[in-house]
Image (spheres, coloured by chain):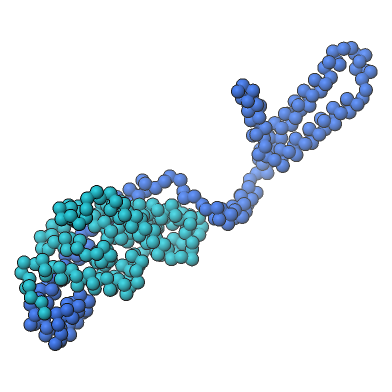
Chain colours: A cyan, B blue
Amino acid sequence: MIDETAIREHLHAGRQHEAFELIVARFQLKVFHLALSFTHNETAASDLAQDALLRVWKALPSYRADASLSTWIYTISRNVCFTELTRARRRATFSLDAPESQGTLDDLTAPDTTEAGATMDVESLLSRLPDKYQRVLRLFYLEDKSYEETGDLLGLPVGTVKSFLFRARKELGRLAVEHSPAAEPAMD
Amino acid sequence: MINCDKCQTWIALEEESTPPVIAAHLASCASCVAFRDAWDLIDATLAQQASNFRLPDDFVLQLAQRLEPQPARLSPEEISARREAWEQEYASESSRLDPWRQIRARSNSLFLLANAALLLVGAFLLTACLPALAQTWSWLTAQPAGLLVLATLFTALALIGAPWAAIRFPRWLPRVGRLPSEVFSLVLE
């Protein structure tokens, strides 16, 4: 694991290329995971992660040493992801509520997980959750079930992450039971 | 006895140990068992999906290709903060250079400037004296010494002022060099 101190030393000495190389090595996977939680698509997430890291490169001269480097990088990456999300929504010329469009969107955003798809259409269930719950849930798994890392990446307190996760799980479980053919209709 | 909502809340919280009251409810409630099984399946599916995602092998290569060839620009604050260090570095590095080399580099500029000054003085003298020279030798002898004194003064000024200006204002030389061509282009326009 690359230490942030080494990156800071390079930045302090004006060696921005060297600092950026270390930043990429250290944060590329996290930024990629963050982008994945927004796009749900590997190729799009890779492009978005590159956009975010390029933005970090351009902003390196304005980095102030008193701020946490990881927080600074995640903030930039999050902003890039949110901007892209807004653009993607503007580009969509059809209604997100229309059932025929929903299927198309799910097809576009679903990753190639044939094994998982055969057992349960989790993507379809996830798409019914609010965005913030989806994002937290996806990132939680991508970050190997770490509340702290998920919170850092999304800029949320750990308590909020836990709360969102709990609500997402409960809602997802309820939806799964509802849409399962073997589910019992009766509930206490 | 707890109800389904509380039981499902507990399942959603993903606690490690199952309290007896939850276990008892699950033993008698099919819908909560279905909820737990569904959630276990979702959990496994999401974990499987997450492990399937991989950063592309050429991610860094693609990023490097998209990077601008120039280094990131320094902000004005950083430039002013680093200026002193740069000047010290420049002074320490330039002091290591051969002093004769520095003098030679400057003497080239001095030589050029001195030549330019001499040409100017010569041209002034020529225009001032040529009509008079064209008259007669006797005119030259009869000419008051004032002109000669003035010419000597201008020459001395040029010889002292040109080297001083070259040292004091080294950046002027290229401008002086460009001046004739600029004037010429202005005249042509």
Vertical comparison of B36 with B136: above or below: below
Depth check, front residue: A96 or B163: A96
Q: Answer left or right for B75 relative to B152.
A: left
Residue at 51 percent of width and 57 percent of height: A13
Is residue B9 visible in the rendered image? The answer is yes
**x, y percent for residue A58:** 43, 52
Quadrant of the image occupied by residue B158 = top right
**x, y percent for residue B130:** 82, 17
Residue at 48 percent of width and 57 percent of height: A62
Is residue B48 visible in the rendered image? The answer is no
**x, y percent for residue B6:** 18, 81
Residue at 24 percent of width and 64 percent of height: A130
Q: Answer left or right for A17 relative to A134.
A: right
Depth check, front residue: B179 or B28: B28
The quarter in which the C terminus of chain A is drawn is: bottom left
Residue at 30 percent of width and 71 percent of height: A161
**x, y percent for residue B132:** 86, 16
Figure disc tally: 0
Vertical comparison of B125 with A78: above or below: above
Quadrant of the image occupied by residue A164 = bottom left
The quarter in which the N terminus of chain A is drawn is: bottom left
Q: Answer left or right for B51 relative to A55.
A: left
Vertical comparison of A105 with A5: above or below: above
Vertical comparison of B26 with B63: above or below: below
Residue extending furthest toward the left: A182
Quadrant of the image occupied by residue B54 = bottom left
